[in-house]
Each structure stands twice: as structure tokens, then as C-alpha cells.
Amino acid sequence: MLKIRNLKAKVGSNEILHGINLDVKAGEVHAIMGPNGSGKSTFAQVLAGRDTYEVTGGEATYEGKDLLAMSPEERAREGIFMAFQYPVEIPGVSNTYFLRSALNAMRKHRGLPEYDAMDFLARVREKVKLLDMDEALLNRSVNEGFSGGEKKRNEIFQMAVLEPKLAILDETDSGLDIDALKIVASGVNALRSPERGIIVVTHYQRLLNYIVPDFVHVLYNGRIVKSGGKELALELEEKGYGWLEESVPAGQTA
Amino acid sequence: MIAVKEKENEGVYLSSFREVEEKLAHGSPSWLQAIRREAVEVFAERGFPTTKDEEWRFTSVAPIAGKAFKPGRHELTPALRQAILGHAMADLDCPRLVFLNGHYCEELSSAATLPKGVRAGSLGEALRSEGAALEAHLARYADYRDHSFVALNTAFLEDGAFVEIPKGVILEKPLQLLFVSEAGNGLVVSHPRNLILVGRESQATIIETFVGLDSATSAGLKPAATPATTAATEGVYFTNAVTEIAVEEGAHVHYIKVQQESSRSFHYARMQVQQERSSSVTTHSFALGGALIREEVRAVLDGEGAEAVLNGLYVLTGSQHVDNHTLIDHAKPHCGSREFYKGVLDGRSSAVFNGAIKVRQDAQKTDSKQSNKNLLLSEDAIINTKPQLEIYADDVKCTHGATIGHIDSEAIFYLRSRGIALAEARNLLTYAFANDVLGRIQYEPLRQRLDRELFTRLGETGRPEEA
Ligand SMILES: Nc1ncnc2c1ncn2[C@@H]1O[C@H](COP(=O)(O)OP(=O)(O)O)[C@@H](O)[C@H]1O
Ligand SMILES: [Mg+2]
């Protein structure tokens, strides 16, 4: 469903992604691991269409379409969802209003009738339960004054409501205690299905105990330097990211 | 007679004053006639302000001064009646007084449901029937001796609303004053004058709405106009309004002004509030329409423990210009004032916020806060914002702050990444910025009306999606 070839991106004159290759098929869960500053968030944001990052080379096709030619909202409506590492606070816009607008934008795109406030609430209630969210958060402004954990949970809650085809989770696990982590993981696992693809970006192996990936890729200095099965995550955890510096050929680290 | 130099632009008003002087005098108390004469002399002397005047530095009234405005008609035709009743602001589900081009329109007014003892009707009428009773208040608060537009309004003072709420009366519903301008072929001026007296420990909400019947609405009022006859003056009018509000001890007043004039109009307004001990007044000023607008709100806290809250919202597009000049005069100790003004500017629009706070020597323990926040939606929009503090007492707390910002691009991306279109995302964030000012309106039907108006207006400013 997602095919990425030699993708390069920069901010200003600073090239961050130096040529990424990745294939995600429906039904697969891919983990992308890497040390701080390796380009994980850049990669996730580029897939979601953030224009701060300029794509300077390569291709990305999503369900046969040119992903890079689509606006962020088109990508979302076509089923791509990116959970932000740092979700944005939006004072004055209620969570419910925001999410209903988002859901209705997707439904309209698919030729489905829009939800009114009642339908929406009914649909949302079960997801609130799934993520063990405080329903009061729904009426608050988007992420405003939420704790770090509440923000992450809110991201997964949005994902659960929007039911994307391709979910990209950017360090959704960092900062979560173990209970919250389990809840978030069960939210993600509930979404796993043969039609969906999931990319889990993480710094730590811990999350992968709960969301077991089919493939693990190591991103280092803007390149995927290693790919393997789930055991690669364990190996990485054991040896630490320092291991990469030794094992990656010198020419690739620059 | 007026023995001063007549400036080119002022001449039309002076000769017009001579024409109507006799008519105005007819049935008017003599004290008022003296005030009118004094006021016209002040106007003749001062003329229109120019940008050399510090108070008008960023607002040129040349477009007003350069036009020969004349009073408009105020007969209610069936078509006009229909147009007025069809206006969204004529449907607020509360008692109302309606004015057409500045004149009271009894047929469309409905004040019968007001509590016993409350008077609400035409000021012109009240002046004829019991002028003496008004002498202590009319033109005593809004000083015409130091202000061209107030002087002009006072010189032509003829009609408007007179509202008197006696001691201890609580109005359950707001009272609306609806000012409708219908300019037809244009260059019409009106000088509405309102006097609101709120008695001791009474409580009231008053909604002052200014609307213009735009060409679409008034099209049905005229024989089909061919494009060739669409004059440059069509729909061009000037509202020059003054409202005086005197609030007695312990009374509570919400005074909400909604300015929704049509797009080619000019609007000057003074809202002058005089407060006695322990009274509380909250004003709201919504500047939405018009081409060139000056909104002045002045409150004098003239008794211990009085409180004033001034709220304001201006939402501009195209080349609109709005100038908000406020003055809170702390004349007595232990008074509080709060001021929250917000502006949204798009296109090539421009705005001025000048918030003056005066704390007199006597006014110890004054507690005053002012904030002005602006959201610029376009690179070409201009805002001039400035607090103006004059403090003569030493034990006071006065804070102020102003911000000018743009739409947060991270928030835009967040919304878009959830499928919300760029234009809608911008509207949503703009609306979120402005929304809390609306939230301060407690009368639900009006809040909803303004809410809808804001959404529609933001819709207009939404940009087409980027490719
Ligand atoms: N908006 C930006 N402006 C400038 N530099 C950026 C920006 N975003 C990321 N970078 C730089 O790109 C590199 C990769 O960052 P990031 O993608 O956030 O890494 P990760 O998510 O793996 O920690 C870092 O050196 C970071 O400083
Ligand atoms: Mg990151």
C-alpha cells in the first residue's frame, strides 16, 4: 500500500533524509527505530505532508497514487493518519467539534452521509472506553492543558475514531507509564487488520512487546541502515544505538 | 449666528443646520436649543479632525468630511417594512425600539412587554412632552465642547432612544434599539442620540444594533435600477451616533453594541457611560460592518466601588478601517476596570486600538487591566495598538498588554492532517480566537446570531485551497 523509493528531504539547506526505501503492505506492522535526531519524525511528517520539509528527491506511492502530490488533508481523507510525537494544543476548538469535523471530512470524501452531533457521540463513546479516556476531555479544547500522557492517548483515540488505512505513530510510547502504554497498545492492536498498515516509530523496544511488529527497520542519520524481523529490536535494545556506529560502514554515517 | 470661519467641508453641515434650526427648535425646550447652538459653533470652530490631531493620527475622516451628506427619508413603506422585519437582527425575541435613518418608527417598535414604570421610546417625543426632566442628563455626559463628531451629533440632536429604568427594576429580557439605515441613492446622514437612565439597584441589558439595508435588500424598494444608474453614491451613508448611559448606585448594566452597517457606509459612535457608586457596567462592542468606522467607548467611574468591563471585537476584511478609542476614567477610589478587545484583520484592512486609562489623584486602589489581541490573516493588514495610561494616584494596580499574531502554522497542519481543509482550518482557528468575546454575551439569541454572522464572515475570508 505504501512504496517509498530513495526519499530525500531537507529543512532549509540541511538535508535530513538521505534516501529512504520502504515498502509497507496491507496487514503489516513495521517498526522504525533509531536514536534521537536520526530523522524519524521528519520521515513521519513528510509522509503526512508537512510543508516545513522540502522533498528533494525520490518517490512515494500510496495505493498506487503519488503521495507527494497530495495535500495533507487529501492524504488524511485517503486514509493516512499520523500520530504526532508532540501533539499541538489548539485553544478554543473543542475536541469533539474538531474530531467530528475531521470524521465528516472523511465521510464526505467517501460519499457517506455526515454525522450529526448525536450520531457522532454514540460512535465516539465506545472508543472512549477502549482507551479508558476521561469523557470530560472531549469537551475541552484540543490538547489544551492535557498532560503528556493524555495528549498521546488523545492521538490514539483520534486514530480509533478515524479508522485509517495507514497509521504512522511517532513515538506515541515515549513518556507513557506502563499502564498507559498497555492501553495505547491495545488501541493500536484493535486497529490491526489485513486491510491496514501500521508504521510504529519508536526510540525504545518496550512498546514492541505490546505491538509486535512484522518488520523492524533502523533509521540512522537519515537512512535505513538495517532491516529485519522483530528480533532486530531486541538486538538493538541489548547492544544500544552505539552498536550502529560500529556496524554501519563509515561512508553511510555522514 | 455663527461668526467663525467656515471650512469647505464643514459648510454643508452649517448651512444645513441653518435650514433645520427652526424646525428643530419647534417644540424643543430652550435649554436644548442653546446647547444645539453652542454645539454647532464648536463644530464650526473645530471642523473635522485631521490626522495631525493626536487622537486621529491613524484615522483619516477625509472620506466623510468630503461628502455632502443629507438627512434621509424615514417614511415606512411596505417594502422597507418587509426588509427591516426580514433582517436577522430584527428577530431577537425581546422588546425593541426601531429607528429608520435616525427617526423613531413606532409601528415596528414593541416595548409593551417591559415592566411597569420602565419608559422606552422616542427621545424626540420625550423632549417635546417633558423636556425639563431631561435637562439634568442630556448632553451632560458626552462632552460636545471638545469633540467634532459629538458636537455635530449634538447640534443635530433630534431623535433616538430615551430609556428610563426606575429604581429596583430588573429587566428579564434585553431591550433592543435597532437602527436601520436605508441610503437608497446615497449620501444620507443620521445623528441618532440615545439617553439611557438606569435607576438605583436596577438591572438591564440593552442591545444597540446598527444595520444597513444593503443594495440587495433595498433593491426591492426602488424601481428596478439599471447598472447605469448605480451611482458612486449608492448605499453610501454616514451614521453619527451618541449614546449617553447614566447608571445610578448599585445598578447593573450590560450594554451590547453591534455595528453591522453596510459595506459602503461610515460610522462614528460614542458610547458614554457615567457610573455611580457600586454600579457595574459591561459594554460589548462588535464592529463588523462599514467602510470607515470609529468606535469610542468612554466610562467614568464616578463613585467608589464601581466596576466597568469593556469588551470588544472587530472583524475586518477588504479595505475596512476600524478605530477603537476607549477611555476609562477612574475618578473615585476602589474602582475596577477590565478591558478585553480582540481583532481579526484580513485583506488590506486596518485597525486602531487606543485604550486610555485615566486614574485621578483621588482614585487610590484602582485596579485596572487592559488587553488587546490581534490576529492578522493577511500580510497587508495593519494594526496600530497602544495603551495610554495617565495615572495621578500612587496606590494603583494597572496592567496592560497587546499582542499581534498570525495563524499558528503548526495548528493548521495538525487540523489538515486530520482531513480538515486548509480554508476550514483557518476559519476554525480564527473563530477560536474570536469566540471567547462572543462567549461573554449572556443573551443566547444574540450570541447565536453573532456566532452565525462570524462564521459566515470568516467563510468569506477563507482562502481557496492551495494546489
Ligand atoms: N523543523 C526543523 N528545522 C530544523 N531542523 C530540523 C527540523 N526538524 C528536524 N530537524 C533536524 O533534523 C534532524 C532529525 O530530526 P527528527 O526528524 O526530529 O529526528 P528524530 O525524530 O529521529 O529524533 C535533527 O538534526 C533535527 O535537528
Ligand atoms: Mg522524533
Image: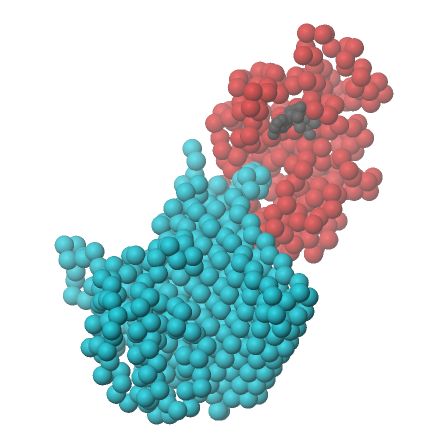
In front of the other: B203 or B123: B123
Compared to A59, does B4 lie above or below?
Answer: below
- Answer with the quarter of the image where residue A237 lies: top right
Identify by letter the chain in red.
A
Q: Residue A120 at what x, y percent from top left?
A: 59, 53
Task: Specify the quadrant that holds the N terminus of chain A.
Answer: top right
Q: Which chain is cyan?
A: B
Measured along the vertical axis of the image, is residue B156 above or below residue A185?
A: below
Relative to A165, is A222 above or below?
above
Image coordinates of residue B407 in percent, x first then y, are 52, 44
User: Going by the image, does B161 lie left or right of B302?
Assistant: left
Nearest the eye: B429 or A185: B429
Q: In percent of the image, x 15 and y 58: which residue is there?
A: B229
**Residue drawn at 55 percent across, 89 percent down:** B167
Instruction: Classify the position of the C terminus of chain A by image quarter.
Output: top right
Q: Quadrant of residue A208?
A: top right
Q: Identify the residue shown where x is 68% and y is 18%.
A: A221
To which quarter of the image does residue B371 belong?
Answer: bottom right
On the question of residue B167 being in view, the answer is yes
Viewer-nearest residue: A112 or B249: B249
